[in-house]
Amino acid sequence: MTKQAFGMVNGQVTEFTAAHRAFNDTPAAMQLTLTVPMSYEDIAAAYYLFINGGGLLSDLDDADWARQVLFDTLFNDSAAAIEETRLEMAELEPGTEEHELAQAIRARVAEIFAPVSAPAQRKRSRAKVSR
């Protein structure tokens, strides 16, 4: 699977790097598609966060970049926390309660998100028509 992510707003597709995948060498197990209803005010709030975090209003002059910023702010702020937690979990010492919890969570994730095979196709038989 690709490490790139894609978002779409009003029919305009944008490609961006998912923060939790940028330097992640663990194999991707799934792709996630979300529909997140957002108003223009919601989008403005995301840009407000971006600018208060060090971005510039002029960064929004390039529409393609501005769309990437939206997805980066919307998705990657949370994804960065996921990446940080994944790295912390990798460092847990075996035999500790935290490690046991992490192992139990990993096992449950493997069950919940196991690939689903396509349902078996029923054999179709032609009904004999009597005349």
Image (cartoon, rainbow, N blue to C red):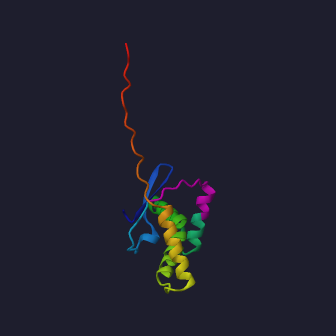
Q: Is residue 121 visible in the rendered structure shown here? A: yes
Q: Quadrant of the C terminus?
A: top left
Residue at 54%, 86% (x, y): give it: 96
Decide which of 52, 20 is in the foreground and name it: 20
Q: Is residue 61 visible in the rendered structure shown here? A: no
Decide which of 43, 1 is in the foreground and name it: 1
Answer with the quarter of the image where residue 46 lies.
bottom right
Q: Examine the structure image and report whether residue 33 is included in the region drawn in magenta.
A: yes
Q: Main secondary structure of the magenta part?
A: loop
| Image position of 38 (left or right of 109) | right
Q: Read off the magenta span.
A: 31-45
Residue at 56%, 70% (x, y): give it: 51
Residue 25 coordinates in the image, percent (x, y): 37, 74
Q: Quadrant of the N terminus?
A: bottom left
Decide which of 49, 18 is in the foreground and name it: 18
Residue 94 coordinates in the image, percent (x, y): 49, 85
Residue 6 coordinates in the image, percent (x, y): 44, 58
Decide which of 108, 46 is in the foreground and name it: 108
| Image position of 65 (left or right of 43) | left
Q: Examine the structure image and report whether residue 44 is included in the region drawn in magenta.
A: yes
Count up the numbered dots. 0
Against 14, residue 85 (above or below) is: below
